Amino acid sequence: MKKQIGFGSLCVHGPEEQRHTRPHQLPIYATSSFCFDSIEQGMEVFLGNQPGHIYSRFGNPTVDAAAGQVARLESHGAGFEASGLLTSSGMAAISTLLMGLLQPGDAILTQGNLYGGTTALFREILQPLDIRFQATGLGRLDQVETCLKKNPGIRLLFFETPANPTLDCFDMAALAELAHKYNCIVVADNTFATPYLQQPLRFGVDFVIHSTTKYLNGHGNSTAGAIIGRDEGQMQEAVLPRLKLLGTNCNPWDAWLLYNGLKTLEVRMERHCRNARQLAQWLHRHPDVEKVNYPGLESHPGHEVAKKQMRDFGGMLSFELKGGLEAGKRFMNRLQLATLTPTLGDVDTLALHPASMSHISVPREVRLQYGITDGLVRISTGIENIEDIIADVEGAMGG
């Protein structure tokens, strides 16, 4: 007969886990570490000879399930399987990936109108480590090739398409082919588009990153990032070790929220796209608007590229008010339905004025060089009724 343990020991140990029932929803594995049935099993798991989890910084069933789902979405219908990892944020995804792929002396080629946080990472973290970067117009393949020829140290091409906040679109297949010609790794930030609208891996891109905080989660209640790669060997040998050592792993709670958000990705994106298209068309006709940046408009320079590589044109747009900085600030203060916030991709409509918010510390001449004008407003179009969104924008313009 098994000896009865003491009351205090019972408080600590409790019953054994019941494994004969299967949950309908993904469980949250809120545990820092995992147990082994024997030392021999533990040795096999540590050596990588047997599947299993060791420590949640290295991997966790909830996190792995969400990472695998993002990877499946990015490679859906592509004829190959991708590999995925989740990180604590989109910035953690970028930093973990680049520190896993690059060495001192290497260089990054990118665009000028890049998300400000990514540019700051390149400048303030990677440059002191002797990983340099340079920007060029990625819409001009001749300029890209000139850069690759002149600087043989460029080992990686990094881009966003559509770009933040000007919605520039770049030809992923052409860029990937050119970069590979010069032995460069190609990385695409697919946060704006999501794998529902475009799948960069299908165009020859090597790695895709996401801030899953945005559209993939969709509800503004978690912060996480994703790294998706075509080559599982590189993911396991170059990227995963950096994630483990840097401690940039996602936690089970945020992974669980992401996993549940992904269930409605298609239906949300359909509504986001439809609303953004109608709002862009309305803004295009408004007398106070100088310019509308939305790939779905035929007037947008990237319209044909977007048509070629996107299923639809997305929920993001930006527009330039004729009154400049003061007009932009006045517009933001008059909004009632939309929320003023420096994020995007939630179900509600979100507004950002880059000149006074996200890019306030960027020198004006640098902003203007890349189309981030004083009167530019970025809208993450939500899934509300489009009539209410347009009425709010119209009211904020004083019309």
Image (cartoon, grey):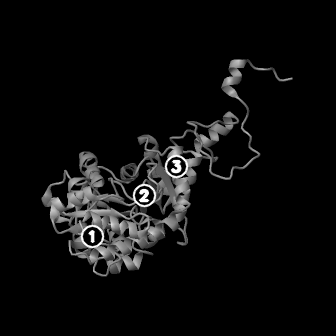
Q: Amino acid at mark 2?
A: Asp
Q: Residues within 10 Å of mark 2 (few under 14, many from 20)?
A: many
Mark 1 secondary-structure assignment:
loop
Residue 303 relative to residue 329: left or right: right
From this viewpoint, which residue is outermost toward the right? 1
Viewer-proximal residue among 113 and 125: 113
Viewer-proximal residue among 260 and 320: 320
Where is mark 1, residue-wise?
138
Mark 3 secondary-structure assignment:
helix
Residue 349 relative to residue 73: left or right: left
Report the Cα–Cα distance between label 2 and label 1: 29 Å
Q: Residues within 10 Å of mark 1 (few under 14, many from 20)?
A: many
- Number of numbered discs present? 3
Measured along the vertical axis of the image, is residue 373 above or below residue 57? below
Mark 1 and mark 3 lie on one chain; the one further toward the N terminus is 1
Residue 281 relative to residue 89: left or right: left
> Which image quarter: residue 77?
bottom right
Kindly check if marks 1 and 3 are in contact, taking CB atoms under 8 A apart as contact: no
x, y percentage for residue 238?
Answer: 44, 51
Measured along the vertical axis of the image, is residue 389 above or below residue 239? below
Question: Residue 346 bears which disc, if any?
Answer: 2
Viewer-proximal residue among 3 and 40: 3
- The residue positioned 34% from the left and 53% from the top of the image is 102
From this viewpoint, which residue is outermost toward the left? 365
Report the Cα–Cα distance between label 3 and label 2: 17 Å
Question: Residue 319 bears which disc, if any?
Answer: none
Where is mark 3, residue-wise?
255
Report the Cα–Cα distance between label 1 and label 3: 33 Å
Give the position of the C terminus as an image quadrant. Answer: bottom left
Mark 2 secondary-structure assignment:
loop
